[in-house]
């Protein structure tokens, strides 16, 4: 089973998520989601685009039309993955898309003509979440059962004060029933005027900012600032 489908199933027994922002909340109760405003279908993103590979992650590498090279591989403790013909390839810290492009480059250089390679994460050794955007240290972080939005931003060394827009911080959560998003004003969260939501395995926290990647910007600026998960 694909890692991210597995992570989606771990989020909550009740499935979808909602959090009301009607006032200060010390804790958030999650229930079936209300969807007051759909995100445009063109504004989609996969966790696999931002997840960074870790040592001991188990990968499915599919080399289209070359079944002899297709198989299951594991990232070594030193952060490399060994593949036929091309040997050890640095993998830790890359997204699956970046690793796929690197494999295409290496196989295409000597062995295959215009190879098409897909990489998927089958298993990971740790429950983790991602912080992207206008923070000082974006990346993938280990999840604690008590991790909240404020703690997630703190683990990324806080907002980049030169570029961050604290009024729009979006949590992206993928479940078996779809991808959901909720926007928060981090200043109001700190003041107790908006909820400080719990972060779950596989979540992506994106902080808006002037240097934000365009694909993220198109997504998070369509999410209403309601503190409610929307599809």
Image: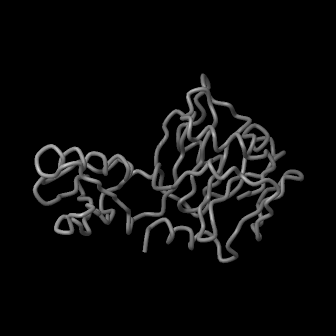
In the rendering, at what x and y percent does residue 120 appear? Answer: 37, 62
Q: Quadrant of the N terminus?
A: bottom left
| Frontmost residue, 227 versus 141 | 227
In the rendering, at what x and y percent does residue 207 appear? Answer: 62, 39
Number of numbered discs: 0
Q: Quadrant of the C terminus?
A: bottom right
Point out the residue furthest to the top here: 162
The reply, left or right, for residue 85 in relation to residue 139 is left
Point out the residue furthest to the bottom here: 13
| Frontmost residue, 112 versus 157 | 112
In the rendering, at what x and y percent does residue 210 appear? Answer: 61, 26
The reply, left or right, for residue 50 in relation to residue 177 is left
| Frontmost residue, 141 versus 208 | 208
- Identify the residue shown where x is 60% and y is 56%: 147
In the rendering, at what x and y percent does residue 92 appear? Answer: 31, 50
Q: Is residue 189 above or below residue 135?
A: below
Q: Is residue 25 above or below residue 191?
A: below
Point out the residue furthest to the right here: 22
Asked which quadrant contains residue 116, the reply is bottom left
């Amino acid at each position: 089973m694909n890692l991210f489908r597995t992570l989606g199933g771990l989020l909550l027994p009740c499935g979808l998520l909602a959090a009301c922002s009607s006032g200060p909340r010390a804790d958030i109760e999650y229930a079936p989601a209300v969807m007051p405003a759909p995100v445009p279908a063109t504004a989609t993103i996969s966790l696999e685009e931002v997840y960074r590979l870790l040592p001991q992650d188990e990968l499915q590498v599919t080399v289209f039309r070359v079944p002899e090279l297709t198989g299951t591989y594991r990232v070594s403790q030193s952060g490399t993955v060994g593949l036929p013909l091309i040997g050890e390839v640095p993998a830790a810290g890359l997204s699956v898309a970046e690793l796929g492009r690197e494999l295409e480059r290496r196989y295409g250089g000597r062995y295959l003509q215009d190879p098409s390679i897909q990489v998927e994460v089958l298993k990971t050794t740790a429950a983790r979440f991602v912080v992207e955007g206008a923070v000082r240290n974006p990346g993938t972080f280990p999840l604690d059962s008590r991790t909240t939005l404020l703690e997630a931003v703190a683990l990324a060394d806080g907002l980049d004060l030169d570029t961050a827009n604290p009024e729009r911080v979006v949590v992206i959560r993928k479940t078996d029933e779809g991808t959901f998003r909720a926007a928060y004003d981090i200043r109001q969260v700190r003041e107790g005027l908006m909820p400080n939501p719990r972060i779950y395995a596989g979540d992506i926290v994106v902080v808006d900012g002037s240097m934000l990647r365009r694909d993220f910007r198109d997504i998070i600026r369509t999410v209403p600032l309601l503190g409610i998960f929307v599809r």
